[in-house]
Image (cartoon, rainbow, N blue to C red):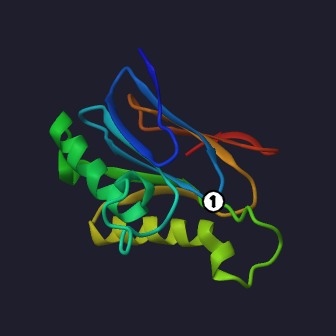
């Protein structure tokens, strides 16, 4: 059993008994996809909502392109595309109290982009823990699909 760390602007896939984790989700979003029957899962740690206008850069950095690549890698690993379900966490408002600037609403935009691409690709979202103003660390149990969320100042929970 290995704990596989997904870095910022990174994505990884794995099979049970491994676990996927990513640290320090602030305005970034962590998106997990899971095939319960095959015990195969994937995680992306995305920094920005859309790849459009950034072609040629690291696709894992962007919510829309990362989700598509995650699906492709999961299917190559043996997951069934139509069996995938998603959980999403992060997307916090980390940059002060001002809610007026769209530039400062990157967490909200990341979370919205994640939900939009998953809806567009017909992947059901089983759980969503986004928003707020605190960072999160997440860990995907690939045997059960449970997502452990550790939130600064709020302890941990499972979704």
Residue farthest to the front? Answer: 56
Question: Based on the displayed image, in which of its 4 quarters is residue 10 positioned?
Answer: top left
Residue 138 percent coordinates (x, y): 57, 40
- For the residue pair 26 and 119, the one nearer the viewer reads as 26
Question: Based on the displayed image, in which of its 4 quarters is residue 157 positioned?
Answer: top right
Task: Please determine whether, in this image, residue 80 is positioned above or below residue 62.
Answer: above
Question: Based on the displayed image, in which of its 4 quarters is residue 19 positioned?
Answer: top left
The residue that label 1 is drawn on is 27
Residue 94 percent coordinates (x, y): 73, 61
Residue farthest to the top? Answer: 1
Q: Is residue 105 left or right of residue 94?
A: left
- For the residue pair 155 and 14, the one nearer the viewer reads as 14
- For the residue pair 141 and 30, the one nearer the viewer reads as 30
- Residue at 41 percent of width and 70 percent of height: 50
Q: Is residue 75 left or right of residue 39?
A: left
- Residue at 33 percent of width and 61 percent of height: 65
Task: Please determine whether, in this image, residue 6 is positioned above or below residue 154.
Answer: above
Residue 139 percent coordinates (x, y): 53, 35
- Residue at 45 percent of width and 70 percent of height: 113
Residue farthest to the bottom? Answer: 100
Q: Is residue 151 left or right of residue 3?
A: right
Q: Is residue 109 left or right of residue 76?
A: right
The N terminus lies in quadrant: top left
Residue 14 percent coordinates (x, y): 33, 30
């Amino acid at each position: 059993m290995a704990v596989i760390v997904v870095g910022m602007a990174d994505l990884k896939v794995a099979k049970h008994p491994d676990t996927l984790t990513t640290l320090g989700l602030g305005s970034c979003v962590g998106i997990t996809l899971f095939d319960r029957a095959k015990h195969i899962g994937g995680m992306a740690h995305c920094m920005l909502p859309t790849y459009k206008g950034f072609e040629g850069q690291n696709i894992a950095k962007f919510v829309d392109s990362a989700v598509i690549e995650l699906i492709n890698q999961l299917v190559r690993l043996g997951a069934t595309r139509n069996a995938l379900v998603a959980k999403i966490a992060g997307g916090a408002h980390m940059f002060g109290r001002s809610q007026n600037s769209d530039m400062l609403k990157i967490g909200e935009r990341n979370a919205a982009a994640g939900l939009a691409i998953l809806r567009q690709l017909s992947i059901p979202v089983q759980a969503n823990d986004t928003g707020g103003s605190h960072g999160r660390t997440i860990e995907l149990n690939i045997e059960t699909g449970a997502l452990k969320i550790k939130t600064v100042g709020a302890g941990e929970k499972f979704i």
